[in-house]
Amino acid sequence: MVKLSVVVPFFNVQTYAPDTLTSLRANAREDFEFLLVDDCSTDGTSALLERAAREIPGAVLLRHARNEGLATARNTGLDAARGRYLAFLDGDDWLAPGFYDRLVTAMEALDCDFLRTDHVRCTGRTRTVRRAPIGRRGEVLRPRDAILPADRTTSVDYPYAWAGIYHRRLLDRGLLHFTPGLRTAEDRPWIWRLHREAESFAAVSALGLFYRRGVSTSLTQIGDVRQLDFIRAFDQVIDETANDRDAERLLPKAVRTYCALISHHVGNLSRFEPAVARELRAMSAAALRRMPRDVLGEALSSMDEERAAVLRRLRRRRGTGALVPARAARTAGAGAAA
């Protein structure tokens, strides 16, 4: 029986993949499998993965015929997974030896739907410990209770899929797949859905996952049109939360977070290609106008005045918003701002 399936997408990371693959070897167990998803790499990554599939115990190579993005690559791995537990790793990150063994042991002891853990952020030679924003450790909690309060950093603001381990029953319930085609912010609707619909989770203070920042091929470093997927991702969060039984309590948190993301991106327009910057402003303005008027007003009132003023001006801006999905436009209904 496979105890743990680890889904690891790769796309053009030949510089970093050797570290990732070496760390998987140092985490191998006879009941672990590593699902290596080659998302149609065009550099030397594919050759590295072919060799890894031959040499790393439990490694299985899966290939995409065309590049489909991180969300779809993760779904490919999930569809092939056989393990009782599941985990994710990105193709440019790495693990300490025996890290997954420790997570499986903790998961078996706590017997919850999913487990969250801390990580080490690596920027060049700088190492910074990032703690999951969950104060109570080693204790089974209700995920829905960890969404709030709206004005503080909570568990849904720590969306990293790779910072944890997940029981197969979540996969069977359809809670682990990602929205197909999202090329950035794919983890935002995913983490919100997990917290709304799973029944139990816990956090443990286990360090051993190293997250590489500042990678030139990462979409967080590229100012092209793919960055705009954060709009589609958070439209989905708003849409689904608006239909939740606790919508009145949870929507303020979702709207406030969406506003913060829009403010962040609009405040960094210079890093985008000019056409993308114009589209970002138009789509952001349309997104703000779709939000429920009263909830948006409360969110803006709670922000610092400078950021709130930028968002108010942006909301008044008229643009086509042509790339905004129609489904999300229905979210706010009659309560949306004109």
Image (cartoon, rainbow, N blue to C red):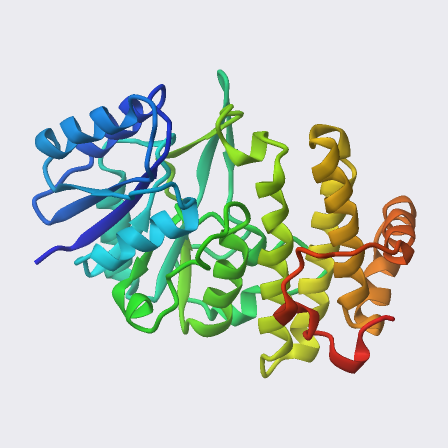
Where's the N terminus, which quadrant?
Answer: bottom left
| Residue at position x 35%, y 47% in the image | 73
Depicted 79 relative to depicted 56: above or below: below
User: Which quadrant of the view contains residue 57?
Assistant: top left
Where's the C terminus, which quadrant?
Answer: bottom right
Relative side of 88 to 255, left or right: left
Relative side of 35 to 244, left or right: left
Relative side of 154 to 28, left or right: right
Depicted 108 relative to depicted 311: above or below: below
Instruction: Kindly tell me whether residue 26 is visible in this rendering.
Output: no
Rendering coords of residue 52 (x, y %): 16, 30
Instruction: Kindly tell me whether residue 167 is visible in this rendering.
Output: yes
User: Which quadrant of the view contains residue 321?
Assistant: bottom right
Q: Nearer the viewer, residue 26 or 227?
A: 227
Q: How many marks?
A: 0
Depicted 112 relative to depicted 208: above or below: below
| Residue at position x 63%, y 63% in the image | 325
Depicted 220 relative to depicted 215: above or below: below
Rendering coords of residue 209 (x, y %): 37, 36
| Residue at position x 65%, y 68% in the image | 326
| Residue at position x 79%, y 70% in the image | 295
Rendering coords of residue 178 (x, y %): 42, 58
Relative side of 214 to 210, left or right: right
Q: Nearer the viewer, residue 193 or 67?
A: 67
